[in-house]
Image (cartoon, rainbow, N blue to C red):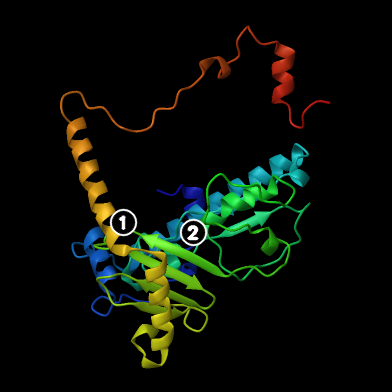
Amino acid sequence: MIPAPYWNRYRDDEIDMPRVGDLAGGEDPHSTRLRHVIGLNIAKPGAANIRAARRAYYGAISYVDDQIGNLVNTLEQAQLDRNTVVLVLADHGDMLGERGLWYKMNFYEPACRIPLIVHAPGRFAPRRVTGSASLLDLLPTFAALANNGNEPAYAAPIDGRNLLPALTGQESRDEVIGEYLGEGAVAPIVMIRRGRYKFVHCPVDPDQLYDVAADPDELVNLAEHASQARLVEEFRTEVARRWDLSQVNEEVLASQQRRHFVYSSLRQGRFQPWDFQPVRDATRLYIRNDQELNDLEAMARFPPLA
């Protein structure tokens, strides 16, 4: 539930309805499977349900926006705002009724396109970057931020790229690689987003190719057009080079078998969850008499005492 103050920031007549209506019967096979996964074949939301869900979502966004404002204000009060980089991002979007779908679990823009906002007035001038980026890019970006703009030598190869050039107005690679092996998938689903094109491939489903610049709602599957056969073949060749999808599928099934076995074993006798249990050093969690009070208060001050 969204708290009343945030629900009441909007009126029903201010809430936009989905840009793309329900495509049941004219959609891709994965979307059809998702309908079954989330129970749309059992209960279909009406217009009032859809509007209420979107209104609550906007309220939730407003709540997050307020908390970010509180964070920035606190940094200013502590005189840390000029030396702090604030990043705002999410792990996924939500279909919110677009195409008749809900939640995430696919590579359509509402589900997989997320915000990436970088606030660092002392380092970067305000600008909008049109190129795509990935969550995998955060690690090398953080490493470069902490190392005077230079990436360190990594102990193992990484897939992400440093986004500092894009933040300073330089050209950057406009590419995102995606993999989906979750709900509704009966085989690996992979995605290549490069420039204006998005290519989605699954061994058991028809290919999908969208020009997201000309067709932002992804309504025209260019993979079905003979004029794009060469581009589709280039993407398929790249998919084969990047992934051994048959091996990926076998590894996923083997992992599922192992996890089912472990789960059934843990349910015998006294149930023991297999969640990670971190070791906590209680001596560092509370005020204790082994710490000087003046030292403790000095450590808690922002900005730190000279």
**Residue type at mark 1?**
Gly
Instruction: Spot the residue most to the left.
Output: 268
At horizontal 69% and vertical 17% (from top left) the residue drawn is: 296
Examine the rendered structure and indicate whether residue 10 appears above or below residue 215: above
At 52% from the left and 80% from the top, the residue drawn is 213
Q: Nearer the viewer, residue 15 or 160?
A: 160
Write down the quadrant of residue 160 in the picture: bottom right
Residue occupying the point 41% across, 93% down: 227
Question: Mark 2 and mark 1: span between their CA atoms?
Answer: 26 Å
| Crowd class of label 1 (few under 14; some 14 to 19; many from 20; radius 10 Å) | few
Which residue extends farthest bottom?
227
* Camera-side mark, 2 or 1: 1
Provide residue 23's location: percent of width, then percent of height: 30, 77
- Dot 2 falls on a residue whose secondary structure is helix
Q: Position of residue 225 (x, y in %)?
A: 36, 90
Q: Which residue is mark 1?
A: 182
Which percent across, then down, holds residue 279?
45, 23
Q: Quadrant of residue 274?
A: top left
Q: Amino acid at mark 2?
A: Tyr
For residue 229, the mark is none
Q: Nearer the viewer, residue 138 or 220?
A: 138
* Residue 107 in view in this figure: no
Kindly identify which residue carries mark 2. 58
**Residue at position x 29%, y 31% from top?**
273
Q: Is residue 272 above or below residue 187?
A: above
